[in-house]
Amino acid sequence: MKKVFTLIAVAAVTATFVACGPSKEDLEKAEKAKQDSINRVDSINNADAAMKLAEQAKADSIAMVETAKADSTRIADSIAALKGGKKK
């Protein structure tokens, strides 16, 4: 009798665990939510990388303009010195 009761108890506990577990649909929803979250993070990281590249390009452009201004001033000073005049 004890063995029968033990088998019934084990069967009941097993049935409870199986019945309370997530369904296939719930597992699929959880996996989709996980993938959506990963995709969102990836897109944010890609946007951050693009923003950093744009900021670097802007800084490079500013540096090039400043270099061009300095070169132009240097050339104008050299020409003025060759002519014997002074630059205003």
Image (cartoon, grey):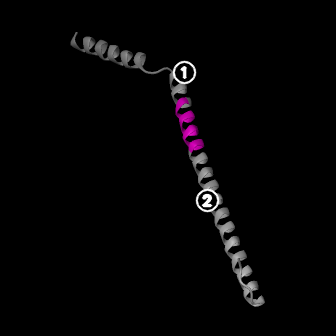
Q: Nearer the viewer, residue 62 or 33?
A: 62
Left/right placement of residue 37 relative to residue 6 reads: right
Amino acid at the residue labelled 2: Gln
Element under label 1? helix
Q: Give the range drawn in magenta.
A: 33-44
Where is residue 20 shown, x and y percent of the image?
A: 40, 17
**Which residue corresponds to the image point at 51% horizontal and 28% vertical from the top-left?**
30
Q: Quadrant of the N terminus?
A: top left
Residue with the mark numbered 2: 56
Residue with the mark numbered 1: 25
Above/below status of 87 relative to 39: below
Q: Does the magenta stretch include residue 42?
A: yes
Q: Quadrant of the C terminus?
A: bottom right
Above/below status of 34 relative to 83: above
Where is residue 13 shown, x and y percent of the image?
A: 32, 17
Estimate the spatial distance between the alpha carbons at disc 2 and disc 1, rounded to whole Å: 47 Å
> Reading the chain from its start, which is encountered first: label 2 or label 1?
1
Q: Which of 37 and 44 is in front in this view?
A: 44
